[in-house]
Image (tube, helix red, strand yellow):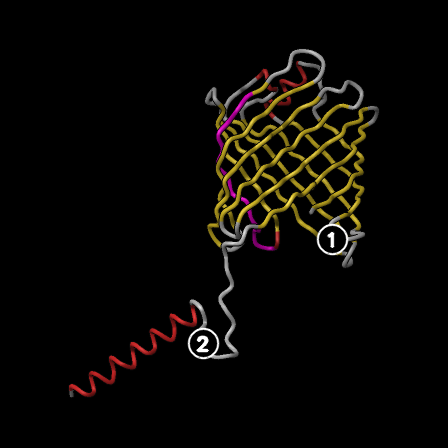
Amino acid sequence: MINRIKLVVGASAFTIASGAGAAGTGVQAKPDWTLPIPDNEIFGQILGDRLEYQRDGNNEIALWDVQAWVGTDRKRLWIETEGETDLATEGGDIENFDAQYSYRLAPFWDIQTGLGAQATFGPGQNRERYSALIGLQGLAPFWFEVDTNLRVTEDGDLSYDFEAEYDWLLTQRLILQGRGETLVAFSDVEEWGVGSGINNIGLGLRLRYHFSREFAPYVGVSYTRYLGNTRDLREREGEGTESSSFVAGVRWWF
């Protein structure tokens, strides 16, 4: 009986030692076993998702939507900025400039938290405000790319933004992208043209051609409609509440 116990204990110790060697240095692993893949390597990317020109009647706008990240597969630092400028007046808005820490919650899904800023620039009085945010970014069922954030400003104004994109591969190089976005505010902030409730709905279609994986010019159309209290604010200021635009731009990354 004692010899049997010794035999079992010895076999278990040999198995543990062999497994440790295979998982560590591989010294005792079989010749055809591969070494573990490290998951702590540092990677990075800069993506110009939308660098485009928009024309709505006589209005001409330049728009940017740029993201950059650095980190591992599970933990990353994200910098995102989005905004537009009126080419006639040279005034515009930085809709967001966000610095976020991102953590991989599950396959295809990251939780993000950080700080953001918004600002206006150009002729006249300019404004700026800052916010804390928490959000989710990932790939929803049926391959929809989703980016959503909950923000609270230094004045306590709460808002929620949602964006979704979907790519139809017409060929290996020709891709039609559908895009939708909306903003929901929980209070009126008139100096920023924001009313409580659903502020707007934005829709777009962009057809791009990939000359390479890193470079793809595109053309398309964009539609925006303002709703509820935000529409009322814009009407009082003499601003439009609906627009349709032709767009042309380029998508790139490295």
Image coords of residue 160 (percent x, y): 53, 33
Judge by depth and name the residue closer to the eye, 193 or 138: 138
Residue on which disc 2 sits: 29
Judge by depth and name the residue closer to the eye, 219 or 30: 30
Give the vertical position of 174 relative to 56 (above or below): below
**In the image: residue 7, left or right of residue 154:** left
* Residue drawn at (51%, 43%) of the image: 136
* Residue drawn at (55%, 21%) of the image: 129
**In the image: residue 248, left or right of residue 17:** right
SS for callout 1: loop
Residue on which disc 1 sits: 213
Tell whether position 169 is magenta. Answer: no
Q: Earlier in the sequence, mark 2 or mark 1?
A: 2
Judge by depth and name the residue closer to the eye, 18 or 181: 18
Image disc number at residue 175: none
Q: CA distance from mark 2 to mark 1?
A: 39 Å
* Residue drawn at (20%, 87%) of the image: 4
Dot 1 alpha-carbon crowd within 10 angstroms: few under 14, some 14 to 19, many 20 or more? few
Give the vertical position of 89 relative to 55 (above or below): above
Image coords of residue 86 (percent x, y): 76, 23
Q: Main secondary structure of the magenta part?
A: strand
* Residue type, numbered disc 1: Arg
Residue extending furthest toward the right = 58
**In the image: residue 22, left or right of residue 7:** right
Q: What's drawn in magenta, residue-wise?
A: 129-142
> Which image quadrant is residue 191 in?
top right
> Which image quadrant is residue 172 in?
bottom right
* Residue drawn at (60%, 36%) of the image: 80
